[in-house]
Image: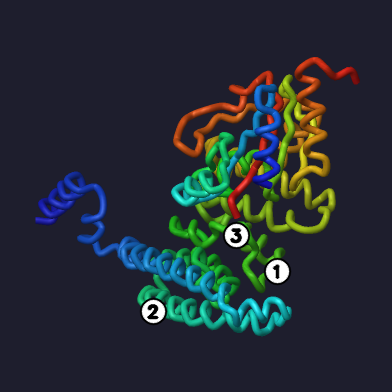
């Protein structure tokens, strides 16, 4: 999923879009190395030593990784999927255009 | 004389509130903790070394050939050759410590570590026996820390054991864990009957009542309902506050006005 996310961040630069992660790795040192290797520039919440059982995934009842929520510019949950959604680029483009006021549904 | 001694003990208790007083009293539970903790750390080191050896083995031509040829038995034998001796060695080490405390409440401490580190041949038997013997113990928590039904045990049996803990244990935390385990025991897998669903929800409600709302187990118990009532498409996303991977605080709402792809991920 990293390459796809990297290209999204690149393609959406300057537009109202952000990837926010909720990361469940337990070993932060190892992860810092991986961020560099994989050029993961987007910000993530860290779930601490509890990993997948941490506070955020617990309350959000996440049971599959990755789980992805798409939240529009008004803060409304528009899509959610376990795993990457089928048409990730199309979905993001649609929501971002809407945020920019281009979309006429 | 007796009065003098008790004053002395009290003075000692005030002077050193942790650790050393228990040693003076010869508390077997504290004693077992001191025996188990370093051993658990040593095991983690051995386990990491074992993982490294496994990764190295997967790079050998022998393994790669077997992988290409889909010879699953051979692949299993190759990993077992590395994993089994290590696990057997550590199972024995922990069993040796467990023997020292057999029949005493302190055996709960050793068993908790054995369960957590998967160093018991028959975890179901251990949970069954220990819950039966120590349902009211303040040290039972570690033995029931996992909501997973132990291998070889029927979910109904696990639920019955948790009921025993709920009825006999005075600790709120332990009761909450027992409610949570019972509520989860028939939750996994297939669709629940209405009756099972109601029972499970009632158990989770008890967890939420017993614990502070930000306790991890409470959050887990809140999860299913939270998802149902707050996380459906069309709903306003709840805010998240936390720290990033470098320890900086931030909130999901810092990104209001943007489209956010909220990705629950791990590098595995």
Query: How far across and how far down the image is residue B235, in percent?
Result: 77, 27
Between label 2 and label 3, give the one nearer the viewer.
Answer: 2
Element under disc 2: helix
Quadrant holding the N terminus of chain B? bottom left
Evaluate whether residue A58 shows in this view: yes
Residues at marks 2 and 3, CA–CA distance in whole angstroms: 29 Å
Residue B17 numbered tag: none
Crowding at dot 2, Cα within 10 Å, few <14 / some 14-19 / many 20+, comes out as: few
Image position of B246 with respect to B98: above or below: above
Residue farthest along the top direction in this orientation: A101
Residue B96 numbered tag: 2
Element under disc 3: helix
Query: How far across and how far down the image is residue A33, in percent?
Result: 48, 48
Q: Residue at x 40, y 77 (%)?
A: B93
Residues at marks 1 and 2, CA–CA distance in whole angstroms: 29 Å
Query: Observer-nearest residue: A97 or B221?
Result: A97
Q: Chain of mark 2?
A: B
Residue where numbered disc 1 is placed: B154
Query: How far across and how far down the image is residue A70, in percent?
Result: 74, 33
């Amino acid at each position: 999923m990293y390459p796809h996310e990297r290209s999204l961040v690149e393609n959406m630069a300057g537009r109202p879009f952000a990837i926010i992660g909720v990361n469940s790795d337990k070993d932060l040192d190892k992860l810092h190395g991986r961020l560099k290797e994989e050029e993961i520039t987007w910000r993530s919440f860290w779930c601490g030593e509890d990993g997948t059982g941490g506070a955020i995934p617990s309350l959000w009842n996440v049971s599959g990784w990755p789980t992805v929520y798409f939240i529009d510019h008004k803060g409304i949950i528009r899509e959610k999927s376990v795993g990457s959604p089928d048409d990730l680029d199309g979905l993001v483009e649609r929501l971002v255009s809407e945020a920019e006021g281009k979309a006429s549904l | 004389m007796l009065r003098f001694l008790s004053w002395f003990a009290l003075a000692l208790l005030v002077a050193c509130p942790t650790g050393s007083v228990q040693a003076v009293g010869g508390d077997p539970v504290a004693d077992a903790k001191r025996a188990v903790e370093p051993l658990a750390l040593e095991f983690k080191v051995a386990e990491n070394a074992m993982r490294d050896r496994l990764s190295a083995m997967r790079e050998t031509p022998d393994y790669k050939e077997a992988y290409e040829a889909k010879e699953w038995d051979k692949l299993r034998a190759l990993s077992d050759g590395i994993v089994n001796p290590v696990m057997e060695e550590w199972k024995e080490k922990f069993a040796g410590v467990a023997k020292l405390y057999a029949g005493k409440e302190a055996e709960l401490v050793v068993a908790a570590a054995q369960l957590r580190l998967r160093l018991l041949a028959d975890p179901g038997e251990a949970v069954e026996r220990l819950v039966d013997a120590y349902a009211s113990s303040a040290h039972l928590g570690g033995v029931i820390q996992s909501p997973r039904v132990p291998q070889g045990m029927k979910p109904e049996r696990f639920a019955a054991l948790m009921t025993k803990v709920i009825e006999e244990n005075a600790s709120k935390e332990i009761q909450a864990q027992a409610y949570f385990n019972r509520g989860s025991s028939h939750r996994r897998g297939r669709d629940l009957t209405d009756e099972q669903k109601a029972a499970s929800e009632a158990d989770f409600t008890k967890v939420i009542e017993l614990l502070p709302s930000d306790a991890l187990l409470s959050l887990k118990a809140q999860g299913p309902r939270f998802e149902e009532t707050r996380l459906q498409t069309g709903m306003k996303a709840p805010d998240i506050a936390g720290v990033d991977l470098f320890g900086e605080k931030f909130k999901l709402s810092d990104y209001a006005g943007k489209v956010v792809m909220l990705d629950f991920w791990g590098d595995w």
